[in-house]
Amino acid sequence: GKVRLNLKWRPILMDPSIAASLGQGKRLPGPPIGFVKMTCHEGRGLKNVEVASGRKSDPYLAIMVQNQIRGKTRYIANTLDPVWNETIFVPVHGVNDTLALECFDWNRVDRDKPLGDALLKVSRLMGTKTKDEHGDLVYVKTEPVEMWASLRQRNGKTKGEVRFRAAFVPVINFDDMLSDADKERGTVDMHISTGGLVLGEEQPEAAPSSAASTSSASSDGDAAARRVAAQAGPSSPAAAAGSNGARNMPVESILSGMTGPGADTLTQTLARYPRLPNIDYAQFKAGVMSVAVVGCRGLVRPFAGVFVTMCLNGNKQAPIVETSPSRRRGCEHVWEDEFAQAAVPEAEYDQLLIELKCRPPGVDVGSDEMISIGRAEYSMKELLRRKMVNTPEPVWLPLEAETGEVLVLIRFDPVEDPQLLASESITDQGTIRMRIASATNLPAADKSGTSDPYVTALIDGVKVWESETIKKTLNPRWNEQGDLGIRQRSKTVLTLEVYDWNQFQSHELLGTVTLPLKDLPINEVVEKSYPLASSNGKAELQLAFKFRPGYVEQHDDSSPVLLDVAHTVVKAPVTVIKGGASIVGNVVGGIFGKIGGKKGRLGGRKRADSGSSGESGQGGSHLAPAAAHAASQATNMPLDDDQKQALAANASATAVNSTGGSAARLGESSRPQSSRDKTRNRASSTVPAVPTLVVPASPVDESAEVFPSSGTVHVAIESAEVSESDGHGTRKRNLLVAVEMNHRTLHKTHVQKDVRHAQWEGEQFALPVLQGGAPVLRVLLKDHSSFLGDKELAAFSLNTFAELKAGLVASGGTQSAVATTLAADGGSIT
């Protein structure tokens, strides 16, 4: 008979965790040809899957190769036009590999929802084929690919776009670079062995009543016996005996893997890899690391379901490998065909984190509750220098506190110099341990001739930490410390302010110090006395810092204000790492300032912060006083009474004028502002008022990307117009313009009713900026409705420094004024 079939191919989007589980452990990665440097810039017009909740999607990008997630960006909350600016390094094995850019909506509880995907073939990054002088087929090196890619939906249509930049970095061809001496040393023949691993007898699970009483009595003796066996060596009688009456087990048969036809075992996989020369690999800057996890031994007590996870630079969101749980219970475990790869873009700073875990008995398989057995962190530079990679056989890596050892085989294939930008380096993010030691010669703010000083720490104008108050002293000693997670350190500024605490009156600013974090050395302790910008000119603040590079996770319990503010202002989100956690390699003593606790909580005590407006105290971002040292008399724009009081008009410092025409036009108004308008402006503008400090101007060069000194940007909104191609013909609108930053409204114009072209007078506001900052404003044109809510007609992103850069360069950093028109399909704003 016959069977009639009708087949149709339909691509689908799949949850990353499900896709990653398909074929896991069955198809092992082949020899790498290099890695792709993928910079995920931004998205626009993405699908909104949160309409029912009245919000917008929280999009992030995941990069997948062969159904495995190789990296993903952080999510950007409540937006359809996210800006990520994150770089992911993806190892590839052939020119026919395809990178899948999967866009998802992050959810705290439910599964992440797909927003679409785009595909990029590696062959597109390889250039054209040609032959070299030896007749071998080679690829001509090509420029990186930067493009907008449409996102495919389940129904085959497209919705939204993402912009990325991709460059291919090939592995090094040793044929042309090895000297005669290198060739004489031969090559490294890598293969899997047991490394002297002896499996002890499998331990039955103890009854709950007896486990607690016997574990403490036997753990010390067992651990000591295991350490003796380990020190005696794999061939000694002590090692053969193992612990708890260990006996030899056929480990070789376990490691041999599948033996059926077409089996893709680890041994067969390694046989396909080209042999590497026997040279010093510490000379190379980057490469592709292939890791085989073979086994573990010497655990503190018998465990069941043990597995190993590895990640680079603490990025647990994209682990290199997570083995399957061991099928036995004991102090020794083995795994088969556990092999994975990862790109090592910076061998000098990259850190390999190894963790040994197991799931508690009775816990659901899908639960995140795990028991941590042991961990260890190794510098890739140290592994290369000590020749623990590219070894003929696997090596034992001890875990911390003698909690066990892990047997791994690590292969390192060097690649050409990836030529990383500062924003692409792992050194541009990490953890800063900050210690506030003491202060000397503070100004006296009280009638008693003393002060009640405390210190606040601000990242790009956002308060993230606060010390205790020391009463009645001019030389306080705090000895408090805290950890701050920083992303894009090269554009982040740390400001420390010392205040005099008052019970009823406003707190008085005693001095401030501003530190660009890019100046901090890497993995070094800096202890220094920093002069405070104070009234007496003698005050100093004694500080200690240590910056450690590493991936900064996006904690769900972190303040969204902190993440959003820093990301929008200088493209550098900041995460507050809660104090109290033990960190390896303590640098300074003392108790952590607990963010969210009694000390250093976000926003600090319920104070009337010096110069802060009412809106700021009710949840607005607290900006540093140093951000507003430039007052209105340094600009050509007159301010109303409220603005004069808020910005301390008697300062004589640098300021800049922005967006809306010449400096004279910014301040001009053909009608006096009514009291009603003033009230409306105070309610709609949430830029907090701050005290004034004087900081001299700094010249601006052509390569600058941030403001070289603190100042004030003045913004005036003059007009807006609805586009003729908005799909509604000549329909009139109720137009208004809103300016946002960090998902907070800085200013909103009054509504012009029944118009297609609106003009405003006196719609202006001032925005303090910090040295090293580059505020990015989101400007929105809206159609106002009292009942249905405002409808967004057009949205624009405005980089204030980019707009003012030309004028600042010409004036030596003193001032700049520019008029600009933002135009899109929905309309335009001047």
Image: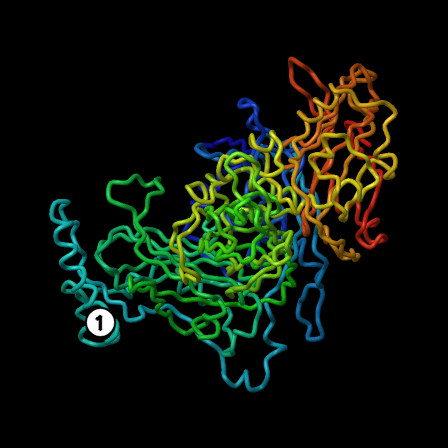
Residue 110, horizontal then vertical, whole percent: 45, 32
Please give the residue where the numbered disc 1 appears in the rendered image: 229
Q: Which image quadrant is residue 156 in? A: top right
Q: Is 718 left or right of 124, judged from the image as shown? A: right
Residue 688, horizontal then vertical, whole percent: 64, 35
Residue at left offset 38%, top offset 61%: 376
**Number of numbered discs:** 1
Q: Is 817 left or right of 491, judged from the image as shown? A: right
Q: Relative to the observer, which residue lies in front, 253 or 425?
A: 425
In this rendering, does residue 59 appear at all? no
Looking at the picture, does residue 54 appear above or below residue 25? Answer: above
Work out which residue is located at the far top of the displayed protein and give it: 787
Residue 221, horizontal then vertical, whole percent: 16, 64
Q: Which image quadrant is residue 200 in? A: bottom left
Mark 1, other Cα within 10 Å: few <14 / some 14–19 / many ≥20: many
Q: Quadrant of the N terminus?
A: top left
Residue 703, horizontal then vertical, whole percent: 76, 57
Q: Relative to the observer, which residue lies in front, 23 or 730?
A: 730
- Judging from the image, what secondary structure is the residue with disc 1 in? helix
Residue at left offset 64%, top offset 44%: 625
Q: Is 386 left or right of 122, judged from the image as shown? A: left
